[in-house]
Amino acid sequence: FERSAWFIPAERSKNGRPHTVPLSTLATALFLQLKTSSGGRKYLFPSPVFKPEQPLDIRVLNKALRHVTKRLELKQCSP
């Protein structure tokens, strides 16, 4: 997060190429705060149900985003 960017390696991207996502100042600050409060865990969003060394399932994050956008009546928002 020091460079205010999120680097996605080729093996994790949809098109098989590495991808860099620029992060806003706010996003960078939030991720750094999460990292500080994570207690040194490998993932910022660990799975509360399965092993803590596993990341939170992407479907959980998408469902939460749909719920929030619907509740706030946001338009043109997608996961």
Image (cartoon, grey):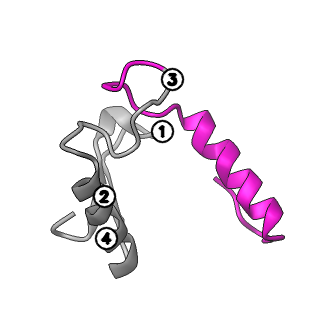
**Three-letter amino acid code at the position of disc 1:** Lys
Which SS class for mark 1?
Answer: loop
Distance CA(mark 4)–CA(mark 3): 27 Å
Q: What is the distance, in whole Å, between disc 1 and disc 3 at their CAs?
A: 27 Å
- Do callouts 2 and 4 mark residues in contact (Cβ within 8 Å)? no
On the image, the x and y values in percent for residue 18 come to: 30, 47
Q: Is residue 58 left or right of residue 12?
A: right
- Residue bearing the label numbered 1: 14
Q: Is residue 10 magenta?
A: no
Q: Which residue: 31% across, 70% down?
A: 28
Check if residue 68 falls in the magenta segment. yes
Dot 2 corresponds to which residue? Answer: 6
Reading the image, the residue beneath label 3 is: 49
- Local SS, label 2: strand
N-terminal of the pair, mark 4 or mark 1, is: 1
Question: What is the span of residues highlighted in magenta in the rendered image?
Answer: 50-79
